[in-house]
Image (tube, rainbow, N blue to C red):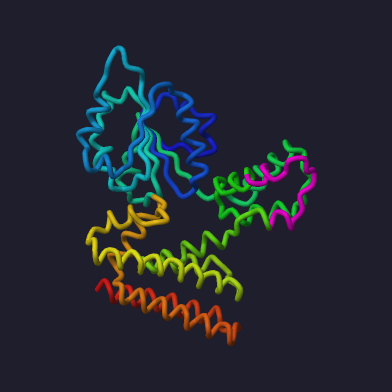
């Protein structure tokens, strides 16, 4: 059964034992999973998708293991993808006494997992999409109203524009603002500008990761959706340089260790879990010689932009498509 995210409070979700929550809005997914758990009591057990794929029998044993003296369980599987669909298809309805929640990324329309849950009468699927500006403005207005803080509509728009359509980002920024406010009763646009993170920080990192991963479709989407300024190109180049240097260091260590997983896990500063699959993919696609060439190219482009910044956007886009062409030649 399909349940819309805004219908969850009105739906009788307690009758379902299996939930799939999917999409790109991490903040909304977090809220939904919290609401689902509220209807159930018992021990919470968390899994990663990779754990289940490696040892499916242990997962099924946990589901089927029932005891008169043991409390009910809530099993949450994080970072799921289409790969887990075969496991879910094997789940027997009769064994679902405990609550199972699958936290998935984006699922395509042709997904087996989506199709199965959407047609099921014992399971529910809840899609999440990016929040629109009005919903984020409403969340922000409620926050400032409760705090009795005066804020202009223009400043609200600026705050919302920096949250990339995700209430999770917005709530992080509101928490930061809350810590800053103390006894303040008015918040200016300048203060919001200083306090909040730029949306471009997220889009630039995504752009660089997509480029270095050879993901042409994602790269084009980001370039089409963002109206980059000349100043933005400096930031994008800095992100490129930072990530390229990290890859070069990792590739250098792989020469000696010859174990990608170990090199990634031992890297300092530690690599965030969410970035590990992307970096692992990039390490398999790039050689030390090729990534060193990218670093040199970045330095040359920066010099050119400093000489004539009117060409900055053309230069950065040409560079990105060169990266993609080079990557396809690497993997061919």
Q: Which residues are magenta?
A: 176-193
Outermost left residue: 57
Q: Which picture quadrant has residue 211?
A: bottom left
Q: Is the stretch drawn in magenta largely helix, strand or loop? A: helix
Q: Quick one: 331 or 250, which is closer to the camera?
A: 250
Q: Tell me how many marks there are.
A: 0
Q: Quick one: 104 or 282, which is closer to the camera?
A: 282
| Position of the N terminus by quadrant | top left
The percent coordinates of residue 253 (x first, y second) are 29, 64
- Image point 40% across, 22% down: which residue? 42
| Position of the C terminus by quadrant | bottom left
Residue 202 included in the magenta stretch of the image: no
Q: Quick one: 181 or 219, which is closer to the camera?
A: 181
The percent coordinates of residue 186 (x first, y second) are 79, 47
Outermost top residue: 68
Is 265 drawn above or below residue 256 in the view shown? Answer: above
- Image point 25% across, 29% down: which residue? 92
Residue 190 included in the magenta stretch of the image: yes
Q: Which picture quadrant has residue 181?
A: top right
Is 102 drawn above or below residue 288 in the view shown? Answer: above
- Image point 38% across, 49% down: which residue? 107
Q: Is residue 118 visible?
A: no
Q: Is residue 243 visible?
A: yes
Direction from residue 176 to residue 13 in the image, left or right? left
Direction from residue 258 to residue 289 in the image, left or right? right
Direction from residue 276 to residue 202 in the image, left or right? right
- Image point 59% across, 44% down: which residue? 171
Q: Which picture quadrant has residue 182?
A: top right
The percent coordinates of residue 85 (x first, y second) are 28, 43
């Amino acid at each position: 059964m399909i349940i819309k995210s805004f219908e969850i409070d009105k739906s009788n979700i307690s009758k379902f034992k299996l939930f799939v929550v999917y999409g790109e809005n991490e903040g909304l997914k977090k809220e939904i999973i919290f609401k689902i758990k509220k209807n159930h009591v018992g021990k919470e057990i968390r899994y990663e998708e990779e754990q289940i794929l490696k040892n499916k029998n242990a997962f099924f044993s946990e589901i089927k293991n029932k005891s008169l003296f043991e409390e009910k369980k809530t099993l949450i599987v994080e970072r799921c993808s289409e790969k887990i669909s075969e496991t879910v298809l094997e789940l027997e309805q009769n064994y679902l006494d405990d609550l199972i929640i699958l936290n998935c990324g984006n699922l395509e329309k042709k997904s087996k997992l989506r199709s199965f849950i959407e047609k099921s009468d014992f399971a529910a699927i809840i899609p999440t999409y990016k929040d629109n500006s009005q919903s984020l403005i409403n969340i922000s207005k409620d926050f400032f109203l409760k705090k009795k803080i005066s804020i202009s509509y223009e400043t609200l728009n600026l705050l919302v524009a920096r949250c990339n359509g995700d209430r999770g980002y917005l709530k992080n920024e509101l928490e930061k603002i809350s810590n800053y406010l103390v006894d303040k009763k008015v918040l200016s646009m300048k203060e919001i500008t200083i306090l909040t993170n730029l949306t471009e920080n997220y889009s630039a990192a995504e752009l660089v990761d997509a480029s270095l991963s050879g993901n042409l479709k994602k790269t084009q989407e980001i370039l089409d959706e963002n109206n980059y300024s000349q100043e933005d190109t400096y930031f994008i180049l800095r992100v490129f340089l930072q990530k390229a240097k990290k890859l070069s260091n990792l590739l250098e260590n792989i020469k000696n260790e010859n174990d990608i997983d170990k090199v990634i896990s031992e890297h300092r500063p530690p690599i965030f879990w969410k970035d590990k699959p992307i970096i692992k993919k990039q390490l398999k696609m790039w050689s030390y010689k090729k990534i060193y060439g990218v670093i040199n190219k970045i330095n040359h482009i920066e010099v050119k932009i400093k000489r004539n910044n009117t060409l900055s956007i053309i230069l950065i886009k040409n560079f990105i498509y060169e990266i993609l062409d080079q990557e396809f030649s690497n993997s061919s």
